[in-house]
Amino acid sequence: MGRMTATPASTPATHRPKRVLLAAPRGYCAGVDRAVIAVEKALEQYGAPIYVRHEIVHNKYVVQTLERKGAIFVDQATEVPPGNIVMFSAHGVAPTVHEEARQGRLATIDATCPLVTKVHKEAVRYADADFDILLIGHEGHEEVIGTSGEAPDHIQLVDGPEDVAKVEVRDPSKVVWLSQTTLSVDETMETVDALQEKFPQLVSPPSSDICYATQNRQTAIKELAGQAELVIVVGSKNSSNSIRMVEVAKQAGVPAAYLVDFASEIDEAWLEGVTTVGLSSGASVPDVLVEEVLAWLSERGYGDVEIVKTADESLTFSLPKELRNKDLRAEAAALLEE
């Protein structure tokens, strides 16, 4: 990898032939880091297998790496044999899934990102106050399914501004909006603006539901997009926040932006006529994959790497409580005897 220099986000980088602008921050957020470490810690403490309901995070490389260590990913808790340990992913689950695990006599570890848990608690609180809850998010996304399950009788999904016209509520004075944590900030606010026009008394959540890491990565991508002819985002096709980063780059005016899991997926034709490549990664991407892309680009003459820093991130989350001072294998065995 070439020489790396820090470039303040507010200062235009001096033009150099064939350079890479590397976003900071990028990659793992605190919630993803916590979830991945939780699987590794569970395997270390209790040995394989550790079952995980759905992908622990939306990244192909991470899932494959954990599978090699002994994690088994399943679609539903009901697939796990009784007397085992099952972990819930960072995206969160509905209360019915916790009940399924109890019925299936499983010991559980809840690796839901605390920022997603915050949205769940907001949903419960507003449902208890008999509000209609308008959840801005993408239909079928695991996080949306989990949040909706907290108050299914009170929540309706709003999948973008085009959905607003069909929204109906019982009492326009008791309506609140919440959102999936991994959305585009700009698109979400466009939807909120449309909802507020329809429902002037619409209540906003106490603080933004879109997570800090999602916002920071989108801000960095906008900065790269203003200086590059090509933006590459490392991330998986089922990663909502990674997909949004590509969309944000295009909306910010970059001529071309692509999402790749691995360096091997980059098409050399993308580099034709390109002197500056912007590079970042989604919040569920380990930096080893970014390093591979940097090496790939360096081999093709893009050895000069400048870091474009737009924010500092220092937030960390403690591991799930079930991994502290608890013997889950013994608990699972006891459940079998009930």
Image (cartoon, rainbow, N blue to C red):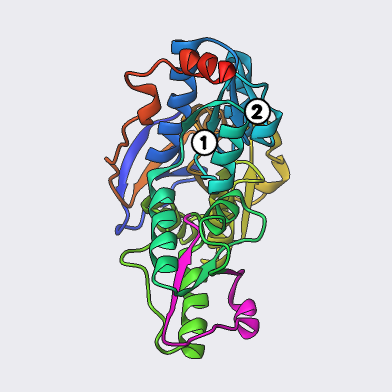
Instruction: Judge the density around disc 2: few (<14), some (14-19), many (≥20) Cα neighbours within 10 Å.
Output: many
Closer-to-camera residue (135/208): 135
For mark 2, what is the residue? 73
Which residue occupies 58% across, 46% down?
96
Q: Is residue 308 magenta?
A: no
Q: Earlier in the sequence, mark 2 or mark 1?
A: 2
Q: Position of residue 141 (x, y in %)?
A: 62, 53
Q: Label 1 amino acid?
A: Val
Q: Looking at the image, can residue 179 be seen?
A: yes
For mark 1, what is the residue? 285
Q: Label 2 amino acid?
A: Phe
Closer-to-camera residue (181/155): 155
Does residue 204 lie above or below 94 as drawn?
A: below
Which residue occupies 49% across, 23% down?
39
| CA distance separating discs 2 and 1 | 18 Å
Q: Position of residue 267 (x, y in %)?
A: 72, 41
Closer-to-camera residue (200/3): 200
Q: Which residues are magenta?
A: 156-181
